[in-house]
Image: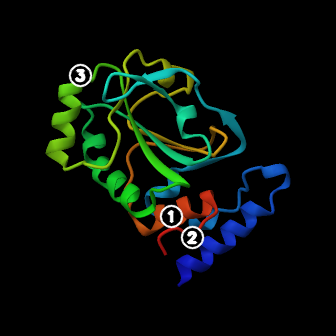
Amino acid sequence: MVRKILATAAYLALSLGANGAVAQDVSDLLTGDMRGLVVHDTPTEASAAAFLMEDETEGALSDYAGQHVLLNFWATWCAPCREEMPSLQTLQNQLGGEAFQVVTLATGRNPPQAIRRFFEEEGITSLPQHRDINQQIAREMGIFGLPITVILDPDGNEIARLRGDADWSSPEAVAVIEALIGAEVGG
């Protein structure tokens, strides 16, 4: 109940922000792993570069226009990424839908077979296996170190960023995501 009240208060603060600016009044929700989440004063444009999808066709972050996106930059060799990935799937299963998606983007050298093996070993079944093979998106978005997770608004702008791994399925993370997307999805 307290979480719902805090999420509602944060939603109201976000919705009352001038000209759609991202409200900074989620600070009470930034506990646990979310303490490191930086919510930007002004949204910044995300990369328009293409990435490779699992079927080897090109995709872009603009394909998710109209949705909030939790974009996770990761790699198959990254131990913290391995710990974090199951919580990303849980978050997708809990909140994913027309208004919100968890998108994973393997950056750098991550052969498709290594990504498939990683997902199989961790039991990941509901997240995309996108690849930023030349690290162009990562470079354009200032991604240094892994994992890094950015939250994009429906216009494709970055509104928040977390360096390092987190339990994205924790009550704290879910409350922050619900507040940032301005919806009481999943309860």
Q: Looking at the image, tell me whether mark 2 or mark 3 is earlier in sequence order.
A: 3
Name of the residue lying farthest toward the top: 134
User: What is the number of the mark on residue 184?
Assistant: 2
- Could you tell me residue 1's position as x and y percent? 53, 84
- Could you tell me residue 24's position as x and y percent? 71, 56
- Residue visible at 56% across and 78% down in the picture: 4
Residue at mark 1 to residue at mark 2: CA–CA distance:
19 Å
As shown in the figure, which amino acid type bears the numbered disc 1?
A: Thr
Q: Is residue 168 visible?
A: no
- Residue visible at 58% across and 48% down in the picture: 67
Q: Is residue 114 visible?
A: yes
Q: Give the label, 1 or 2, closer to the camera.
A: 2
| Quarter of the figure with residue 145 | top left
Q: Is residue 53 left or right of residue 59?
A: left
Classify 138 as above or below 167: above
- Could you tell me residue 184's position as x and y percent? 57, 70
Considering depth in this image, is 87 or 164 the residue closer to the camera? Answer: 87
Residue marked by disc 1: 31
The reply to whether callout 2 and callout 3 are in contact (CB within 8 Å) is no
Considering depth in this image, is 14 or 39 the residue closer to the camera? Answer: 14
Q: Is residue 27 left or right of residue 88?
A: right
- Residue visible at 73% across and 56% down in the picture: 23
User: What is the number of the mark on residue 111?
Assistant: 3
As shown in the figure, which amino acid type bears the numbered disc 3?
A: Pro
User: What is the number of the mark on residue 171?
Assistant: none
As shown in the figure, which amino acid type bears the numbered disc 2?
A: Glu
- Residue visible at 15% across and 35% down in the picture: 117
